[in-house]
Amino acid sequence: MNNEENNEKENFQIKSEIIHDISRIETILNSGIFNAANNYNPLEESAFIELMILLRDLIYKAEKIGERVNFSDDIITDANTKDVSDTIRHIRDSVCHINSGKRIVDSQRNRVSFCIHYGKGVFANFGDIVLKSDYEDEISFFYGHHQLYLKRHIIRAFKCAKEVLKQKYNI
């Protein structure tokens, strides 16, 4: 197989993965699984885990073509977290690697995993660390000391990555 055939095959595979990721993310987001009425649905955490895996894949693919999703509005930053892509990577790692330590919130080794807060308010206090939502119209997801808002982070990052990947791969 020559280089052109390899590139064509690789582009087909990447394009297929992108199409699959977009379709599944849209299905999950449109399912209503994250509505407050479904708060105790036994598949809510599973849906979130799949969402994080697929969204991380799309964001990584966008970054590989030089289109990093890098907004930082309402992102909790630290030495390893500068923007939404870093936060999604952190949370994706947290959901997939339970014992990685990425769920630890503070020096007391308190852990937070798959905690959801609907609307504006404080979810939890850990000394100087306050996990809270600043928006009445939002759903917040917490892993460790990191937070993602559904609309302001997850959906926005998805739309950004989807747009650049669709343009690049003519989807």
Image: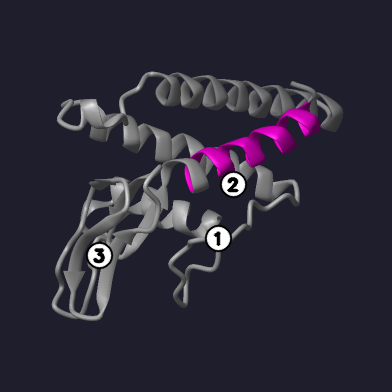
Of residues 108 and 4, which is closer to you in this image?
108
Write the start and end of the magenta stretch as one range: 153-169
Any mark on residue 37, and which?
A: none
> Taking 98 as reference, is 33 above or below it?
above
Does the magenta segment cover residue 116? Answer: no
| Disc 2 packing (10 Å; few <14; some 14–19; many ≥20) | some
Q: Secondary structure at mark 1?
A: loop
Q: Quadrant of residue 36?
A: top left
Disc 2/disc 3 C-alpha distance (Å): 22 Å
Query: Could you tell me residue 61's position as x and y percent?
Result: 64, 42
Q: Which residue is mark 1?
A: 73
Q: Which residue is mark 3?
A: 101
| Disc 1 packing (10 Å; few <14; some 14–19; many ≥20) | few
Q: How many marks?
A: 3
Q: Quadrant of the C terminus?
A: top right
Q: Quadrant of residue 159?
A: top right
**Marks 2 and 3, the one that precedes in the sequence:** 2
Q: Secondary structure at mark 2?
A: helix
Q: What kind of secondary structure does the magenta stretch mostly adopt?
A: helix
Disc 2/disc 1 C-alpha distance (Å): 20 Å
67 relative to 116 in the view: left or right? right
Q: Which residue is mark 2?
A: 60
**Marks 1 and 3, the one that precedes in the sequence:** 1
Tag 2 and tag 3, C-beta contact below 8 Å: no
